[in-house]
Each structure stands twice: as C-alpha cells, then as structure tokens.
Image (cartoon, rainbow, N blue to C red):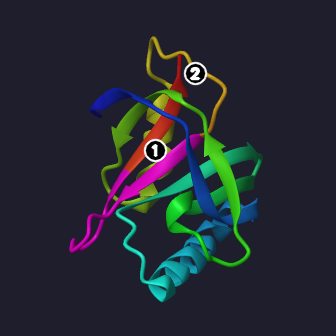
Amino acid sequence: METRIIEVEAFTVRGYELKGPLSEIPGIWDVLNEEIAKSGIVAEESFGLCLAIQGGEIHYLAGVKSNLAEGFPNTEEAVVPAGKFIVAKVEGGVSEISTAFNALLQMDGIRLRNSYGLERYIHPKGSEGYTIEVWMPVE
C-alpha cells in the first residue's frame, strides 16, 4: 500500500452525526447525499470522521467542508485540527476501509497524535464514482 504524509490547516466538517453501531454508517451517508442533491451544491470531496469508537459503537460524522453545508438542516460540525496525516488510497471500495486503517496502524515508525482518523471521498465535478482515502493523524 502506497502512503504519503501530508500537512493540513485546520478545517471544519459539517454534516450528519451517528452515535450507534457501525452498521448504521451507510444510512447517515444516504442522508448527507440526499441533502447535497437537494441543495444543488458541488462537493468535490466529502469526509467521514471517526470522532470516537468503543466496541461496536461509533461516534461518526459524514459531511462536507462547512462552507458548503450552509442551510443544511439539523447538522453537526467538527474541526479537524491542523497537523500531519499519513494517507493511503483505499483499494477495493468501501468494504476495504477498515483494512486500510488497520494497515496504517500496523506500520513501523508511525507515531499517532491525538486527532480524528477520517475517510476522504474524492469525487470531482463530472466524474463517475469516487476515490477513497483514509487519513490517520501522525506526529
């Protein structure tokens, strides 16, 4: 798996929150995607933030950068703090996201920092489909 280290400025993600079983994540994406379609915005990227996880329960936010979500009803937001992330492209689609996260966690020489792990979905205007990346915060 190819990885790269990036450094980002802080940014805010606004969208729909889930506190529940991992199996409910697709439903929260349905809500976000419906709202994006209704609003007519062009979101060339979207994010899935793992705010906390314990056992089979997750605190998760599916959203877009906050300036794009103005007017979306009943949203929550979270700030992704500035800093470094190790990034890997997910091969094989959504079902392989956990495999990619686990591979990053097992890499030698990686020191995690306190922040959110996240998924980034890249879907440029006019494209069919999307690319998925996983980001883990590192020192």
Q: Give the crowd class for mark 1: few <14, some 14-19, many >=20 residues within 10 Å.
A: some
Query: Residue 90 location in percent, x, y?
Result: 35, 48
Q: Which residue lies at the image location 59% right of the left edge and 70% below the top edge? A: 70
Examine the structure image and report whether residue 137 is included in the region drawn in magenta: no
**Seen in the image, is 33 located left or right of residue 80?**
left
Three-letter code for the amino acid on which mark 2 is drawn: Leu
**Mark seen at residue 4:** none
Say if residue 91 shows up in the picture.
yes
Lateral position of residue 99 relative to residue 82, left or right:
left
Q: State the CA–CA distance, disc 1 to disc 2.
A: 17 Å
Can residue 65 be seen?
no
Q: Give the range drawn in magenta.
A: 117-132
Contact between labelled residues 2 and 1, with CB atoms less than 8 Å apart: no
What residue lies at 27% left-to-right and 32% top-to-bottom?
2
Name which residue lies at 73% across and 44% down. Answer: 52
Q: Give the x, y percent position of residue 123.
A: 31, 64
What residue did someone put label 2 on? 112
- The one of 124 and 105 positioned closer to us in this rendering: 124
Q: How crowded is mark 2: few (under 14 residues within 10 Å), some or many (20 or more)?
A: some
Direction from residue 48 to residue 61 in the image, left or right = right
